Amino acid sequence: MSPNVVESLFLKFSVDKLGELMNRVDACLGKLTQEQIWARGAENENAVGNLVLHLTGNVRQWIVSTLGNNPAPRDRDGEFNARQGPGAAELSKGLRGVLEQAQTVISGLDADSLTRMYEVQSCRVSGVEAVYHVVEHFAEHTGQIIFITKMLTGSDLEFYGHLRQPRETSPR
């Protein structure tokens, strides 16, 4: 397998995985009320709204700003300090917009940009590490958003419903 094939597989999987995770965040936001989006169980916990703001800032900083060479300011502390804010539609629109920019950047990366070293949040990382970090980070917080949504709504989000065995009908 040539390096270009591996590079292409990595980039495509990263773009596709981010899209899948975004759809799960959207599904969660669609089940929550404004109050639930900003609810915290305790002061040291994050609300779903905080996590979405944080993902938006993280993706923008690591991919759009750094790998895409499109510097933008970030207020990381503000992402976590917010106690109220936008509703589901606005949070989703903001995250999806940044994610689409990031997917464009990721899709356009080549071997040079993947092996180049970058400075992000006082860390020196390669392009590969930056992409991997963002996908991993997005997945971790999506899992938290899913867990919070299930706790607040008591609903099964059916992300893997297609894997359930059909129920056998009992003879009458």
Image (cartoon, rainbow, N blue to C red):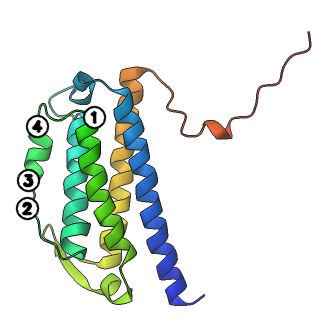
For badge 4, the amino acid type reads Ala
| Labels 4 and 3: the sequence-earlier one | 3
- Per the rendering, the mark at residue 75 is 3
Residue ID at (42%, 28%): 150
Helix, strand or loop at label 3? It is loop
| Labels 1 and 2: the sequence-earlier one | 2
Q: Nearer the viewer, mark 1 or mark 2?
A: 1
Residue ID at (38%, 85%): 110
Residue 96's place in the image compared with 3, above or below, is above
Q: CA distance from mark 3 to mark 2?
A: 7 Å
Residue ID at (27%, 34%): 88
Q: CA distance from mark 3 to mark 1?
A: 20 Å
- Per the rendering, the mark at residue 82 is 4
At label 4, counting other C-alpha atoms closer than 10 Å, the crowd grade (few under 14, some 14-19, many 20 or more) is some
State yes or no: discs 3 and 2 in contact (Cβ < 8 Å): yes
For badge 3, the amino acid type reads Asp
| Labels 1 and 4: the sequence-earlier one | 4
- Displayed quadrant of residue 52: top left
- Per the rendering, the mark at residue 88 is 1
Residue ID at (35%, 31%): 148
State yes or no: discs 2 and 4 in contact (Cβ < 8 Å): no
Residue 117's place in the image compared with 82, above or below, is below
Helix, strand or loop at label 4? It is loop
